[in-house]
Image: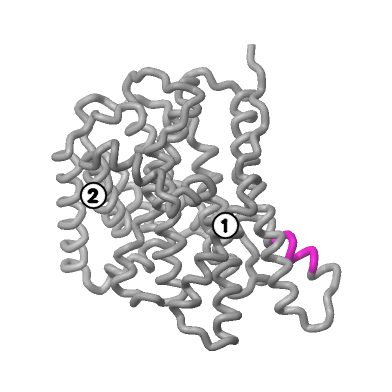
Amino acid sequence: MSETAAPPPAASRDVGLDLARGLLMAWIVIVIHGTFWLGVIPRGPGAWLLFEMPPIFVITGAAYFLGEGSKQGRWTSATYFDFLLRRGVRIYVPYLAYVIVAALIAAIVKWDGSLSLKEVGASALSWLNPVTRGAGYTWKMLSWHLWFVAPFLIVTALMPFITTKRVAGFVKPWMLAVAAGLVVLGLGRVTLIQPLDELLKNGVFYSFWAAFGFMLAAMPKRWSLADYALVLVLSIVGMIGAAMLQPASVTLDMQHNKFPPNAIFWLFSCAWTAALLIGARLTRETQREALARSPLVRPFMSAGYSIYLWQGVGYSLAAYFGGELGLNIYVIWVAAIALTIALGLMFAPLERIRLPKRKTG
């Protein structure tokens, strides 16, 4: 999905990507789930803040280019399996640690005095599977955010395939947005059995964003601010037009449009991503470096995935004990954030597990 570009340095990290990822994780944990899990701000305005997932996958695609991009065109079954194993361990092991604790908490809270081996096995299978993620055996908010893991695994597995084609030089972001948007619109007309329907629509939707991130990393200055501004305007016009022309079938509640992602959520995501790219282009390097050094941001940069996972426990325990003590919702919110960060940092070493690369040749 890129034009010819110089291979990235293998050993270096991109501070800008780490910063963007950290800020997005902080946004999810603090703002999004404070809004939708605790109701610290009304859901209506909060729905317009649900822009976080497409940029996360843009970063995923960019990080893939920096880490694996120089290998384009040289994949074999052995190297692909090695890639899946290494990436799968980094994603699933932290998830495994989290769901073991979450399953124990749910079992303790919901225990009614009897526990059969069959029920234990069914609970374990439900939690260990990122697709079912504890369905039927969860409690409060322990599993609400885990929907992200299955699409993340799917997109990761698809990266070597969705980044093999070069995009012609004349192609503009609005063309990519229209082409991908038509695919998303077409998928919205199809309903499959669950969980296949959710997996397919999430996988396709977020694969587009990951492929776009790969292109951005390969050719970071390929498009201008005007190109992104055009996408922003067209996306807003498209949303307004759809809502006016089909008021009975189109809603601007993005929480509804997000699960599974539909064409309106695609336009919404395009608008926000374009605005974020414009903002990123206008910031100075010194500003980004100063923000990256902030002690408020660094935990999310260094342990973002772990913090994301452990917010289920952090929010659930804070909400339960806060409710029992009659605490103000904003006190519960602060406690949930603090507990989430503490747990995330405690378990962060698990996301830094690295299997050695398979030797080739």
Residue ID for mark 1: 309
- Depth check, front residue: 275 or 162: 275
* Mark 1 neighbour density, 10 Å: few (under 14) some (14–19) many (20 or more): many
Q: Residue at x 64, y 50 (%)?
A: 94
Report the colour scheme.
one colour
Amino acid type of disc 2?
A: Ala
Type of amino acid under label 1? Leu
- Mark 2–mark 1 Cα distance, whole angstroms, equals 27 Å
Q: Quadrant of residue 167 in the image?
A: top left
Q: Position of residue 26 (x, y in %)?
A: 43, 56
**Dot 2, how many residues are within 10 Å of its Cα: few (below 14), some (14-19), or many (20+)?**
some
Q: Position of residue 37 (x, y in %)?
A: 47, 73
Q: Which mark is residue 23?
A: none
Q: Which residue is mark 2?
A: 275
Q: Is residue 336 left or right of residue 36?
A: right
Q: Along the horizontal axis of the image, is 202 left or right of 2?
A: right
Magenta residue span: 120-126
Classify residue 49 by image quadrant.
bottom left
Q: Choose the circle earlier in sequence order: 2 or 1.
A: 2
Q: Is residue 194 visible?
A: no
Could you tell me which quadrant the C terminus lies in? top right
SS class of the residue under badge 1?
helix
